[in-house]
Amino acid sequence: MKVIMPRPRAMFCLGTVLALALTTAAHAQTLVPEQKPVPKEYFGMHIHKLVRPHRDGTRTVIPQIGLGAWRLSDGAKWSDFNPSQSLWNFGLLDLYANIAAQHGWSVHLNIGVTPRWASSRPSELGEWGYGTAAEPADMETWKSYVRELATRFKGRIHAYEIWNEPKYSDLERTVANDGRALGSYTGTSAKMVEMTKLAYLIIKSASPGAIVVSPSPTGYTDDRVNLFLARGGGKFVDAMAFHFYPRSPERDLLPRVAMIRKAMKDYGVGNLPLWNTESGFIISGLEPIDPAQFPDTRIFTPAEAAPVVARSLILGWAAGLSRYYFYAWDDGKYGLTSDWTTGEPNLAGQAFEQTRRWLQGSVLKSCVGKSDIWNCEIQRAEPFLQGRIVWTTDASANLVLRPEWEITKVETLAGDVMPAGSSVKLTESPMLLIRAGE
């Protein structure tokens, strides 16, 4: 029998999100983020093949964009590190940690994916093999693994995420009729909270400076977050995680961030940072993409993706996200590079970099959206910057520059700078209006 923990609030769902989006689209919406400089760690990325080769034998080189955090994926799972009970294999993770240290990146590791020998359901076929979506049969095995990991990589791994995209069997169906897992985790929410608590206590003992991040569900409801928090999971994490994957930054990223933020507040952990630990867009150009694989999902060209990449970063911070990890630099279907063997960004990657240059070290004073026009005031002490990032969600719009803004230059998302006139023509691509004195 499925049991859903009682909630002190109404569950948000897709209909609620869309209703919020429609409401805010018709009225002015003001976002005021925490008044502090945007840190470099906000700009996160997945990079798959810096060490191991792609299917064609090539390897990814270091991206020619600025990054602050790297969420590991390729070969970085418990089932990789501990393939049998008596065997540890941390060679690849050592290399990853060394690369990150060389480039000043914060390392973010997802610690789930149970090896089959340790699994409580070894015959259940998960995404990464048999048994991988189950909790361990013996929690002492989990504790030994976490202790080995946190002790060995003290100061080298900076954030430990408990599990990627879980589903909970006390909330929903998690296993298909043929025995295949329907999610990356198929157990109960109670077991997930138990693993979170054990991992938190061990990591904080072995590596006190490390950040423990909650499991990262995805979707258009807050039910999995609610269940985890109702079970007490919020007491054993330093940050909450969710995978937003927005179709539109304005129409569904903003209301879903508000949805998760409200759930956190309702369960007494509203003070915790909220991380978007995986998010991206289907982008053509690196390998053939079959639209049938992605029904009801837009496939962008790099040029089309550039504006939404930029707006996602800007509005993500404005809405209260503390990290934003794009998936993925060198993925054939989501990539932000035009050639992973050279490190060159495509137009979407260039938009990521330009937005990072605008935001990193800056204070975003506010973002106001009204009548399809967004206007975000930005300030930075060093290098000095005062101005506004503006765009429209309509095809185009004309924005009259107020005299008190003292705008003298305009910088486009492509990096072109030109003198300002009395007005600017807005598009879906953000531009920076630069105040006199910059």
Image: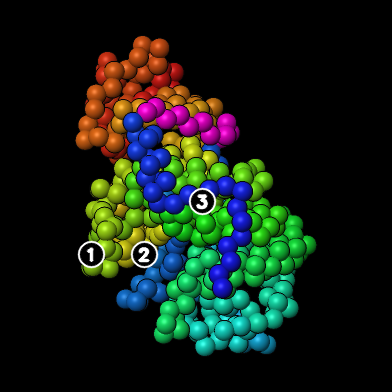
Left or right side of 270 for 179: left
Residue 41 seen in render:
no
Left or right side of 191 for 434: left
> Which residues, given as a range, are shown in magenta?
27-37
Q: Is residue 171 above or below residue 354?
A: below
Tell me, yes or no, whether the highlighted magenta stretch contains residue 266. Answer: no
Residue in the image at 65% along x and 42% along y: 271
Disc 1: which residue: 291
Q: Around disc 1, counting alpha carbons within 10 Å, would you say few (fewer than 14), some (14 to 19), or many (20 or more)?
A: few
How many numbered marks have been drawn onto this rendered protein structure? 3
Residue 204 image position (x, y, % from top left): 74, 60
Separation of residues labelled 2 and 1 (CA atoms): 16 Å
Left or right side of 378 for 294: left
Residue type beneath disc 2: Asp
Disc 2: which residue: 331
Residue type beneath disc 3: Met
Numbered badge on residue 1: none
Separation of residues labelled 2 and 3 (CA atoms): 34 Å
